[in-house]
Structures are given as C-alpha cells and as structure tokens.
Amino acid sequence: MGELIEFPSNGSTAGGYLAAPDGGSGPGVVVIQEWWGLVDHITDVCDRFAAAGYVALAPDLYHGQKVKPGEPDEAGKAMMAMKMDQAARDMSGAVDEVLRRGSGDKVGVIGFCMGGGLALVLATQRPDAVAAVVPCYGIIPWPDAQPDYSAMTAAVLGHYAEKDTFFTPEAAQGLADELRALGKSVEIVVYPGTDHAFFNDTRQEVHDPEASRQLWERTLAFFSEHLR
C-alpha cells in the first residue's frame, strides 16, 4: 500500500515510509519507530492507518539501518548512535510532509518503545502542529534529553504494559502526574498481564492480540477526536 519516499528535513533530505488512503488524502499521522529501525512492523502500522483513512509517514531515523528483532544489544547500540538533533529534524520534516500531503492543519504522532519517548519530544518541539500524541510503552530514556513539556499543546494518550520492566507503569504514572501538573490533557492506559512491545505482532513471544485490538481502537478514536 505504501512507498519509500524522501522529504525535506531542515535544508537536507530524510527518508521514510509513506502510506495514504485510497482517496489520496486524510488527516496526517507520524509513526515513530522502535529501536529496531524502520522494520516491517512499523511499515505495517502505516498501512493500517492508511486503511483507516489517514496519511501516515514513518521517518527512517536510522537512515537505512535495521536490526533484527531478538538482537537487543545491537538495537541498543543503534539507538545510542542515533543523533538526537538529526532525529528531531527528521521528525519535524515528517510533520511538515504529512501536513502537505494530508488534510487539516494538525497531525497526530504515535511512537513505540524508543519511539514513544521520541513522540513526546516531537510534541514539545512542534506544538504548532501536533494535536495528539500516543506513546506506546515508551518514555524518554535519556536523562539529558528531557523535553520542556510546558511547550506541548497536544493531548496525550499513553499505552503501557503491566509487566514492562523497561518503562514501568509507575514511570508512566509519574509522566502523567508531571503533565497534569502542567495542565496538560493526558490519559494513561495500563494493559493487564501484558509485556513490553505487546502490540508488535512480529514478536509472538510478547504479542497480545486482545490488548493490541484495544490499543488500536482507542488510538483511532483518540485521533478521530483530535484530528477530524
């Protein structure tokens, strides 16, 4: 359904996977990768958004590098090698690209694992455009890269796993408390019995079909409320 494209990124170019609905247009959504890179799971998420009527773009923050699921040490190295300033420019460029290709003047952002934290970063950097942000079992893992949440105007819907040892429900609740203290709109959903990355259906060892269905339905309803 989708295709690999290049798009402007602060005077340079970036790449990513774009999927659009059959009608050619719709509200824009930026999809932020896990630490594995722009793998099949992420492109499939874009395709699913397109089938639901959205223009979805996943920027390739690793610029062509992919890590096989099941190799977390390599994924960790790739994440640590990622340049945050470049990633920020690429994500912002993706926002502009879906605004150009889609309908409306606001976009949604969804991210998974590492991408959940980056989705929050993007919402603070582009309050002019990001109206809804959905971090999925992700919080910003870099102590020296905490964003200025006061700048964020987007509503937040966070999906977290009860048994997650990377980004715990307690950490998610701490994020929610911080955001509410700043007057932000935030809802955190913790899925009972689930593990980190439960939405990733290419990882059968953690995938939870029922929790995934609920996550998807809640996300579509959330984006419909804030973007349509």
Image (cartoon, rainbow, N blue to C red):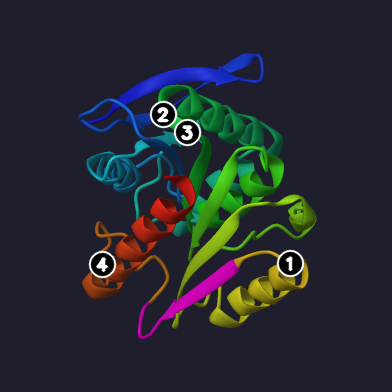
What numbered label is drawn on residue 213? 4
Q: Earlier in the sequence, mark 3 or mark 1?
A: 3
Q: Main secondary structure of the magenta part?
A: strand
Q: Which element type, helix, strand or loop, lies under badge 3? A: strand
Does residue 26 appear left or right of residue 139 in this picture?
left
User: Mark 3 — residue?
Assistant: 104
Q: In which quarter of the image is the C terminus?
A: top left
Query: In the image, what residue occupies the spot 42% across and 30% down?
Result: 103
Above or below, 22 against 207 in this view is above
Kind of residue at disc 1: Gly
Distance from disc 2 to disc 1, alpha carbons, whole Å, reads: 29 Å
| Label 2: few (<14), some (14–19) or many (≥20) C-alpha neighbours in 10 Å | many
| Label 3: few (<14), some (14–19) or many (≥20) C-alpha neighbours in 10 Å | some
**Residue 110: image location, x then y, percent:** 47, 51
Distance from disc 4 to disc 2, alpha carbons, whole Å, reads: 26 Å
Kind of residue at disc 3: Gly
Question: Mark 1 and mark 3 in contact (Cβ < 8 Å)?
Answer: no
Q: Report the magenta residues as a range.
A: 186-194
Residue 206 seen: no
What numbered label is drawn on residue 183? 1
Q: Which dot, 4 or 2, sits closer to the camera? A: 2
User: Mark 2 — residue?
Assistant: 102
Q: Earlier in the sequence, mark 3 or mark 4?
A: 3
On whether residue 217 falls in the magenta region, the answer is no
Does residue 190 appear left or right of residue 154 in this picture?
left
Q: Which dot, 1 or 4, sits closer to the camera? A: 1
| Label 4: few (<14), some (14–19) or many (≥20) C-alpha neighbours in 10 Å | few
Distance from disc 3 to disc 1, alpha carbons, whole Å, reads: 25 Å
